Image (tube, rainbow, N blue to C red):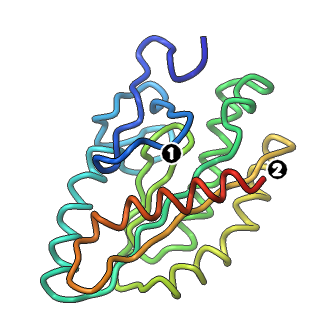
Amino acid sequence: MGPASAPGMGRRPHLIDDAPLPEPHGLVGATSQAWYDASTGIPGPAFWAVVLGTESARSARYHRPSTIVLAQVVGFDSLVRRWGLELAVLGVIDVVRVLRAGCRASDYVARLADDLIGMILTETDEIAAINMIERVRDRCDQAIELRAGEGRVAFGWASPRPNRALEESVAKAEELLRRDLRRG
């Protein structure tokens, strides 16, 4: 029985109404409706849904830039099988620390599933978001490698087109994440 089907494990929430990302996982010891993820100390999927709606409205109304960034620990299932759930989660915690350090206090970071972190970078266009991702990518990969001896983190990002809702950017960010997952 894999992590996604273990008793008490919720399924990854749909970030929007499009198809979910491949190999969904539930939050460890929580449901997809969790407001807070105790293992990482950051908000959960329910918080993400509320903030995404709020920031989408703010961004559209005031024509302010915002960018969605998704980060996924590649091979989380294999880390669980090889090293156990506890060590795999510790790797995710290490990645969350790197991501939080790479974000500003005004940005939002939430754990959306065992292996998936969502970020809303406020007042940030796509170019600045890509720069942030490049600053943290190697450190995230190193955090996983130090903890588990292998692994990497894949990223997807997107900003809304002018006069469009931030929520619409999630699908593009998911697509870029899928591409990065296939790359290696």
Residue 170 left/right relative to 58: right
For residue 63, which numbered disc appears in the image? none
Front-most of 124 and 17? 17
Between label 2 and label 1, give the one nearer the viewer.
2
Q: In the image, 75: left or right of 156? A: right
- Residue 48, above or below 87: below
- Give whichever of discs 2 and 1 has the lower sequence position: 1
Q: Amino acid at mark 1?
A: Thr
Q: As shown in the figure, which amino acid type bears the numbered disc 2?
A: Glu
Task: Report the label total.
Answer: 2
**Image coordinates for residue 79, horizontal then vertical, percent:** 74, 32
Marking on residue 145: 2
Residue with the mark numbered 1: 40
Percent x, y for residue 105? 40, 75
- Give the position of the N terminus as an image quadrant: top right
Judge the density around disc 2: few (<14), some (14-19), many (≥20) Cα neighbours within 10 Å.
Answer: some
Identify which residue is drawn at 69% across, 51% down: 182
Q: Position of residue 78 (x, y in %)?
A: 74, 30
Front residue of this view, candidates 180 and 118? 180
C-alpha distance separating marks 2 and 1 = 18 Å
Disc 1 residue crowd, few under 14, some 14–19, many 20+, Cα 10 Å: some
Helix, strand or loop at mark 2: helix
Residue 10 % position (x, y): 39, 25
Look at the numbered discs 2 and 1 and tell me whether their residues touch, using CB distance below 8 Å. Answer: no
Q: Residue at x 27, y 63 (%)?
A: 167
Residue nearest the observer in this picture, 143 or 170: 170
Q: Residue 170 appears in which quarter of the rendering?
A: bottom left
* Residue at left offset 60%, top offset 83%: 131
